[in-house]
Image (cartoon, helix red, strand yellow):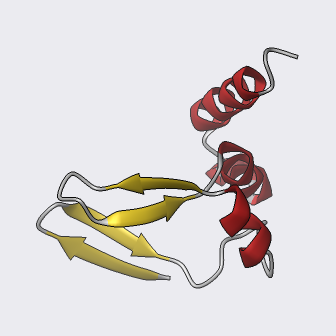
Amino acid sequence: MFCLTTNHGALDIFREVLGLENRYDECRRRAYAARTATGISFAGLSDRDMLTCQESLPVEQQNSRRMKILRRAILNEKGGE
């Protein structure tokens, strides 16, 4: 992991993401397309993949608030199943 400081804040660059190792192609298919405020395109991890990352962390490093929000978003994507 590389941790950089920019004029716009912290930027963390990961070569691999815990829980998603060797799954780049399938994560890329599920990623969403977006743009920064200055118009730079990027692909963001899906809510499901972000949750997988959180669940793969040691318990003391998991962000329970983030996990709750991601689970709610995933349920909403499925139509509240």
> Quick check: 4 above or below 66?
below
Q: Residue at x 73, y 31 (%)?
A: 74
Q: Residue at x 22, y 73 (%)?
A: 5
Q: Quadrant of residue 29?
A: bottom right
Q: Relative to residue 79, is residue 6 drawn left or right? A: left
> Quick check: 51 above or below 35?
above
Q: Decide which of 65, 47 is in the foreground and name it.
A: 47
Q: Decide which of 60, 75 is in the foreground and name it.
A: 75
Q: Position of residue 73 (x, y in %)?
A: 66, 28
Q: Position of residue 2 (x, y in %)?
A: 42, 83
Q: Decide which of 59, 37 is in the foreground and name it.
A: 37
Q: Relative to residue 4, is residue 21 drawn left or right? A: right
Q: Relative to residue 39, is residue 30 drawn left or right? A: right
Q: Position of residue 54 (x, y in %)?
A: 69, 51
Q: Quadrant of residue 16?
A: bottom right
**Name of the residue lying farthest toward the left:** 7
Q: Residue at x 36, y 78 (%)?
A: 3
Quarter of the picture containing the C terminus is: top right
> Quick check: 8 above or below 79?
below
**Name of the residue lying farthest toward the right:** 81
Number of callouts: 0
Q: Quadrant of residue 41?
A: bottom left
